[in-house]
């Protein structure tokens, strides 16, 4: 709980000073104690965070500037957990103000790329916790997809006619590129090995959670040639990758993946690439009308059967508590290399042998 003195500062400081001044003093005190007394330095950050947490609609531009400066300072001091917690508080307060039409603007700190923090943070958090948060984010997007969107997307992908479907597909691609970039951006061989192994473990947990979507996204990322050529795996890790390869194998029309989906107990997130492939073949490979001129209801029934896989998957939600530090670390999976940049980086790490 909050003791009386602490609570007095948080809730009544506006009667004897300004919030701006309190926040500045907390940051100054943190700088004073950072190298001499870790416990007091962390207390300064906690007080700053608690004061900011109770601003709500009174958030101002100066407060945002002070908090942004403090977040950058904490990042520079390698205080990752404290920095991410404070940044999340600032985002929460700003979101509240925006929803209540308060006149403030805020952009998260961009001078420190979230990707710079990822690989160290990734190694500190349990792979299952990473997989759980990925699954929760996936399901939130997956559950918004309407069946009518799926049909429109198969016929002509458009953010206008199938916004949630487009959002989910873009998210899948972002996750895959993000994972590949995490490995390729590491400077040393050891760092690349460690990140690769951790992502491989995350993929295993995604499969156990029946999140076939992000499991497939990570599988595609880890099997990308630009990535595989710069890492060396143990026999145990090769076996994990081979097992996943067997599950994700596209031969015989994804026979093994279909079997896994059929036997999986909800909650689950289907791999939409499989559903899209089935619907594309069905819709474009069969006539809308029979030779008699009647509507081809068999085609319609099969179309619904394929789409119903999505509907039934959406019916049972995951019960996963959000972890703000992990969600902030993901940064919407927006920090990644494009395909060409990945190859350039891969060849920088391991130049191709010149032909004699």
Image (spheres, grey):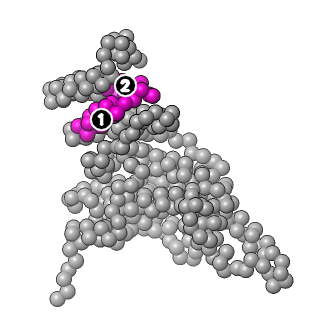
Quadrant including the N terminus: top left
User: Which residue does the image show at 25% across and 67% down from the upper left?
Assistant: 345
Taking the magenta stretch, the answer to whether it contains residue 65 is yes
Residue 305 falls in image quadrant:
bottom right
The residue most toward the top is: 4
The residue most toward the left is: 36
- The picture places residue 273, in percent across and down from the top left corner, at 55, 67
Q: Which residue is mark 1?
A: 65
Q: Which residue is mark 2?
A: 50
Majority secondary structure in the magenta region: helix
Say whether residue 26 is visible.
Answer: no
Disc 1 versus disc 2: distance between alpha carbons? 17 Å
Say whether residue 316 is visible.
Answer: yes
Residue 10 falls in image quadrant:
top left
Callout 2: SS: helix
In the image, which residues are magenta? 47-73
Mark 1 is surrounded, within 10 Å at the Cα level, by few (under 14), some (14 to 19) or many (20 or more) other residues, namely few
- The picture places residue 214, in percent across and down from the top left corner, at 48, 57
| First of labels 1, 2 by sequence position | 2
- The picture places residue 274, in percent across and down from the top left corner, at 57, 68
Residue 36 as seen in the image, left or right of residue 65? left
Callout 1: SS: helix
**Who is closer to the viewer here, 16 or 138?**
16
Residue 288 falls in image quadrant:
bottom right
Mark 1 or mark 2, whichever is nearer to me: 1
Residue 319's place in the image compared with 283, above or below, is above
**Who is closer to the viewer here, 177 or 192?**
177
Mark 2 is surrounded, within 10 Å at the Cα level, by few (under 14), some (14 to 19) or many (20 or more) other residues, namely some
Residue 259's place in the image compared with 72, above or below, is below
């Amino acid at each position: 709980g909050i003791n009386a003195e602490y609570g007095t500062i948080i809730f009544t400081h506006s009667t004897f000073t300004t919030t701006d001044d309190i926040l500045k003093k907390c940051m100054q005190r943190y700088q004073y104690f950072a190298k001499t007394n870790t416990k007091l330095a962390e207390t300064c950050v906690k007080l700053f965070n608690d004061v900011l947490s109770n601003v709500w609609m009174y958030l101002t531009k100066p407060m945002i500037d002070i908090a942004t400066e403090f977040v950058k300072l904490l990042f520079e001091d390698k205080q990752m957990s404290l920095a991410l917690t404070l940044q999340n508080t600032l985002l929460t307060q700003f979101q509240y103000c925006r929803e209540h039409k308060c006149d403030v603007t805020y952009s998260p700190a961009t001078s420190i790329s979230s990707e710079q923090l990822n690989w160290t943070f990734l190694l500190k958090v349990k792979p299952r916790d990473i997989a759980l948060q990925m699954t929760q984010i996936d399901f939130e997007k997956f559950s918004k997809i309407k069946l009518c969107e799926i049909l429109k997307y198969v016929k002509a992908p458009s953010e206008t006619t199938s916004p949630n479907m487009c959002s989910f597909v873009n998210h899948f691609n972002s996750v895959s590129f993000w994972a590949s970039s995490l490995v390729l951006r590491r400077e040393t061989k050891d760092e690349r090995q460690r990140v690769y192994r951790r992502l491989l473990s995350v993929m295993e947990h995604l499969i156990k959670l029946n999140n076939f979507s992000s499991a497939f996204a990570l599988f595609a990322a880890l099997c990308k040639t630009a990535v595989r050529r710069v890492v060396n795996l143990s026999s145990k890790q090769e076996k994990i990758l081979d097992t996943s390869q067997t599950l994700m194998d596209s031969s015989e029309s994804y026979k093994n993946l279909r079997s896994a989906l059929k036997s999986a107990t909800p909650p689950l997130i289907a791999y939409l690439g499989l559903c899209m492939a089935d619907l594309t073949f069905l819709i474009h490979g069969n006539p809308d009308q029979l030779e008699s001129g009647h509507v081809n209801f068999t085609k319609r029934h099969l179309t619904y059967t394929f789409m119903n896989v999505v509907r039934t998957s959406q019916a049972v939600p995951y019960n996963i508590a959000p972890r703000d530090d992990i969600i902030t670390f993901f940064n919407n999976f927006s920090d990644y290399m494009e395909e060409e940049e990945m190859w350039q980086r891969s060849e920088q790490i391991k130049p191709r042998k010149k032909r004699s």
